[in-house]
Image: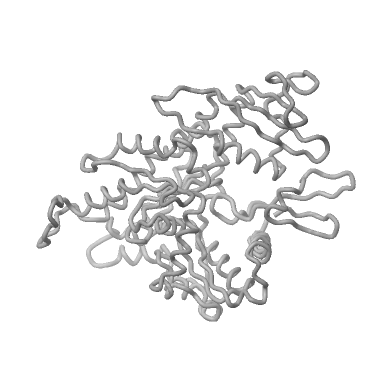
Amino acid sequence: VAQGEEEGKSFYCGEEALRVWCVQRPDGAQYVLQRPMRRGRLDLRGRTREEALNDLQRVWEHALLNVLQIPPKELPLYACVLVVPANACKADIKSLVTLVLGRLALRSCAVMQDAACAAFGANAVTACVVDIGEGKTSVSVVEEGSCIACSCHLLGFGGEDIGRLLLWLLQRGGTSSTASKPGASMGAGEHADGVAKLVLGDLDPREPAHVEAFKAFKERACYVLSAQEDLAAATHELSLHRLYGPSTLHRVRLGAAACIAPMGLFNPKLFGPLDWSAAERKPWGDAEEVVDEEFIVEMLQNRPGGGVSPHDDKLVLREEHLLPESGAAPAALHEVVRDAIARAANLHPNTKPEGEKLKEGAKDVSKREEVLSKLYANVILCGASAHIKGLAEAMETRLNKTKPAGVQHASVLVNPKDRHSASLAWSGACIVANVECYKEIFVRQEEWHARGVQVLRERVCFPW
């Protein structure tokens, strides 16, 4: 959402916002780029929750009216599936449901976790889902269609950090030629007037059009180098439009930067200091909430027989499992995947089932070993940055080197069933919306107004 004052229109949404320039104009008018969500949370930096919801409402109303072409008077006839992160903040979920059923006045709403929807989109009910988005990376284990809470990990880096590292490397070691008109040719590192210039020096991170152009450039040019390949210094083009002055076409020779930037996923120290404030889960107190995480822990500790057991961890979303300790660097992505799978498998007994007949050709293994083999065989990459060339192969190689002894082979899937990784969760949400057994998880508008969070806690398919 770009907000400001120009010709009587106070804001633009979607593709229109990408054509708005946020620099101050000679007449004093200026737009400000607002992103309602950041790193999987409502962006509350420097503004209230109500202001963030107002921006999100504008985006959704724009999508419903101008993209889906649904008139506002017909919205009460529609139901929706609200896809939220597997480790979403409860306060954010409540605000989003209030926006859907209260302000937009849709008929009903179902809340589903993105990892479970991505697994459904890949036609899998048990999988380890790695979501590499633009602002955050999350790892969640889905077992029998439900996310295992103690296996959910939130990493405070994503595609924008890959782009930031790529730009830093290019401006210090890349070469480029810049032309004011597409098709002109010049020497590397020279501008139209023959003066050496910083690589991509015209890129303005405050301008939405420049940010989106560089994002597409990053996804097109970056790749993960395998041990058998040679490093090729390919040249890629990036066109940057400017409000005052001619547009520029940059021909950039990436060199090693193209494969070093995505390697930050496996060595997050390359990304430098990361902003964790947007990813932290804040304590939530709500008069409508009768049962919270502290109550569940206290109840389990006071039960006959002792304290919390490992099998009870799946009931509680543990804060320490989501973010690294203060001052510690985040773990490599493949190490987080290995840890998430181990946590989910440890919920099952390591004993062989008694009294069950094995199918012909089946191996006599424990339930834990069976779950480990299933999860390592179904690691699903989704998100906007998941289709970087060579990323799936690099992940698979690292998992095969560190897999447990009883696991035969690790398999990493990207774009499964010919469904694009960026929209895999939405493909799964479409499946949920059309399956009869999931009709009972929908919360109707009148139920929400009457009972609020209580009815939501009863209907969702994950521990609330």
Q: Residue furthest front?
A: 183
**Which residue is found at the position 77% from the left and 19% from the top?**
195
**Residue 357 image point, x, y percent:** 11, 60
Q: Quadrant of the N terminus?
A: bottom right
The image position of residue 219, as x and y in percent, is 55, 39
Measured as percent of width and height from the top left, residue 379 is found at 36, 47
Camera-side residue: 464 or 446?
446
- How many labels were placed on the picture? 0
Regarding residue 83, the answer to whether it shows in the image is yes
Q: Quadrant of residue 192?
A: top right
- Of residue 48 and residue 298, the one placed in the foreground of this image is 48
The quadrant holding residue 266 is: top left
- The colour scheme used here is one colour
Q: Is residue 207 above or below residue 459?
A: above
Please report the residue visible at 64 percent of the width from the left and 70 percent of the height from the top.
70
Q: Quadrant of the C terminus?
A: bottom left
**318 sits to left or right of 160:** left
Q: Does residue 375 appear to the left or right of 39 in the view shown?
A: left
Q: What is the x, y in percent for residue 321? A: 40, 49
Task: Residue lying at the far right in this picture: please name it.
Answer: 27
